[in-house]
Image (tube, rainbow, N blue to C red):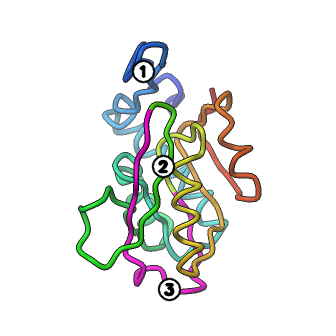
Amino acid sequence: MPELRTRIREVQDFPTPGVGFKDITPLLADPEALQQTIAELATWVREIKPDLIVGAEARGFILGAAVAAEAGCGFVPARRPGKLPPETVSASYALEYGSNSLELHPELIPPGTRVVIHDDVLATGGTVEAIRGLIERIGGEVVGACFIIELSFLGGRERLAGTELHSLITY
C-alpha cells in the first residue's frame, strides 16, 4: 500500500508567489494510490451514513462521485456560476488567493437530507463554509466534510468548528 503523502507534489510559487501548491495529480495517476484514497475516504463516509456527498468544483468532483459510489450514497456537484441550468442557489466566498462562487440545485437536497461535503484540500475553510451555508439554507443537514489534504496552518478546521472533519494527509 503506497504512502499517500509521497504521491503529493509541491509546486512552489503557484498560483501566486509564496504559495506552495499541493498537487494531487500524481496521486490520481497512480492506480493503487487512487483506489486507496477512495477506499479510505469511503470508509469514513460510511460511518456517518449520509444520503449525499456534495463535491466542490472542480477537484471535489474527481473523487467525490467515486467516494459516493463506494460509500453507497448519491453525489451532487456544487458548480461555478452559469454551469447549471436554473434554478440554483448560490454562495460567494474568499479563497487563500482570490474569491469564488458556487451554485447547486436545491431540489436535489430536500429538507432533512444528510450531507457530507468533499473537496480535495481543506485550506482556510471558505469553500466548505459556503457550501455548508447553501445546504443549510435549503434545509439539508451537513454531517461532515472530508478531504485528501488538510493545510492545518491556514486555520480551516477552526473556521469549520462544529462540523465533523476527516483528512487523509495533514501538512
Where residue 133 appears, as percent x and y from the top left, is 58, 65
Q: CA distance from mark 1 to mark 2?
A: 17 Å
Residue at 35% across, 28% down:
26
Q: Nearer the viewer, residue 136 or 20?
A: 136
Disc 1 residue type?
A: Arg
Q: CA distance from mark 1 to mark 3?
A: 39 Å
Per the rendered image, the range of residues in magenta is: 98-117
Q: Is residue 170 left or right of residue 96?
A: right
Q: Is residue 112 left or right of residue 12?
A: right
Query: Which residue is the site of mark 2?
Result: 119
Which label belongs to residue 110? Answer: 3
Which label belongs to residue 120? Answer: none
Badge 3, how many Cα within 10 Å: few under 14, some, many 20+? few
Q: How many marks?
A: 3
Disc 3 residue type?
A: Pro
**Which is closer to the viewer, label 1 or label 3?**
3
Was residue 116 drawn as part of the magenta stretch in this picture? yes
* For residue 62, above or below residue 12: below
Where residue 103 appears, as percent x and y from the top left, is 38, 64
Q: Secondary structure at mark 3?
A: loop
Residue at 74% across, 44% down:
158
Badge 1, how many Cα within 10 Å: few under 14, some, many 20+? some
Where residue 115 appears, as percent x and y from the top left, is 56, 70
Was residue 154 drawn as part of the magenta stretch in this picture? no
Q: Secondary structure at mark 2?
A: strand
Quadrant of the rendering where the C terminus is positioned:
top right
